[in-house]
Image (cartoon, rainbow, N blue to C red):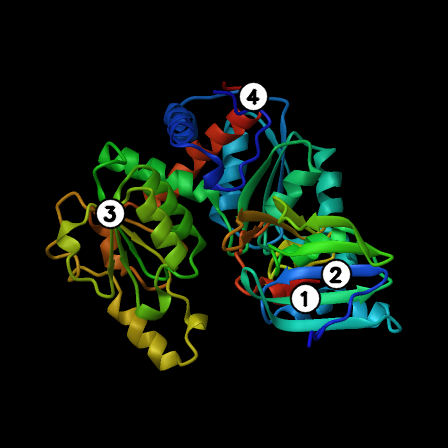
Amino acid sequence: MNFKGRDVISIKDFSREEILYILDVAEKMLPIAEGKKKSNLLNGYIMASLFFEPSTRTRLSFEAAMKRLGGNVIGFAQPGTTSLQKGETLADTIKTAESYCDVIVMRHPKEGSARMAAKFASVPIINGGDGAGHHPTQCLLDLFTIRKEKGQIEGNRVALLGDLKYGRTVHSLAYALALFKVDMVFISPPELQMPKEVIEECREMGANITIKNSLEGLDEIDVLYVTRIQKERFPDPEEYKKVAGSYRIDLKTLENVKEDMIIMHPLPRVDEISPEVDETKHAAYFRQTFNGVPVRMALLALVLGEIK
Amino acid sequence: MKELKVQPIKDGTVIDHIPPGNAFKVLKILGITESLPDSVISIAINVVGKRGKKDIVKIENRELKAEEVDKIALIAPNATINIIRNYEVVEKRRVEVPDEIVGIVKCPNPNCISNTKEPIKTRFIVKSRQPLKIKCYYCEREPEDISSLIM
């Protein structure tokens, strides 16, 4: 499999086999990601990290991934310090950045921005989130986490909980899980349900989908993927409080769950998971965050052609 | 007594087989009422033809160009364009929805990169022709009322 020069814009650009291959490479990166083994695999390469929107985990883990492999990083975390402030187009910024680096990682508030950047750049573009669009590296690290925690992706019953209408990570994740024909339960308030197109697409791909509005039935779940319900989706703050409260995960909601059920969350969380849950064996979200490093190391090494 | 509902034209374009009720939209897309203020344009709505009802638009002294035909194809995928010279049909073109629609339809997503000052044209991938379904190449939005988005 040759990934050299490839853009990483959407999880849909990758086949099931390619996804598994990326996860295999990420697995091999684990000792380097943990700092137990040193590597100079990407020595001499430069990654431009262009973050037009705030990010903690995506930006830091990409930079850590590049540096763990001996590569260098240039870039910005605030567009306020760049010529964009003077009215420069994204196209021009990309054409400038590509002349200084070997790979570009970007996050931008507009949907389709990474797809457009890929048109203008001759170096690979890795999408670190484009508005409400795609976030393929999050999706890959989610799959990596499920496989690492549960042994395999197939055969699990995965519940996606929270804002399923607007949450960009859950749409990509649902698609990717459908590629593995995973049984899924979509749990959300009625006004934040998974879009019909996503449900239909997953069903057409052979996934078994159940739609629910409450937390009942968590005892059948192997992986509970929690997302944030955003306040701004509700015109009435009281309504938000009521809805958010009824989907909150705490020790009581976990009373009857399977022993080995894991809870994932793309983070940042607000109060959808009570901090007391962090101490339970179910909490996998901080391990999930760490997994961003080996997965992003794998992608960088693959698109730069140092691993084939 | 035979009565001609719409008179034949000497030179120009006849757009036939427009879905009934869409003649005005075709005119709007072509922007002809503004660009040809002196041209005579005849419209027939709900004409009963061999294959049911249809609309017909006749534009005198104006031969439609290919890129204009593409625009029409979005709301009248089965339309035919007849070029008339001296009362004779000299050319008959069928409109066909292309595989990609570039620079014709505006993306309805206000947050799409194609709705900014970036140096790109709007671009849609045609997912299905019957019924017409298109998807923004950039943000992947699938607009419903395509005719209202024609630029």
Residue A86: horizontal and vertical position, in percent? 79, 57
The residue that disc 1 covers is B56
Seen from the viewer's position, the closer of residues B65 and A124 is B65
Q: Amino acid at mark 3?
A: Asn
Residue position for label 2 = B14
Q: Is residue B44 above or below residue B137?
A: below
Q: Are marks 3 and 2 on the same chain?
A: no
A219 lies above or below B27? above
In this view, the residue in front, B76 or A77, is B76
Relative placement, left or right, of B135 versus A164 is right
Task: Give me the residue at 58% from left, 27% from top.
Answer: A71
Residue under numbered circle 4? A305
Report the front residue among A13 and A200.
A200
The CA span between labels 3 and 4 is 37 Å
Q: Tag 1, which secondary structure?
A: strand
What whole-number distance in Å separates the C-alpha atoms at marks 3 and 1?
49 Å
Single out the mark in the foreground, 3 or 1: 1
- Which residue matches tag 3? A208
Q: Are marks 2 and 1 in contact (CB under 8 Å)?
A: yes
**Label 4 amino acid?**
Gly
Q: Amino acid at mark 1?
A: Ile
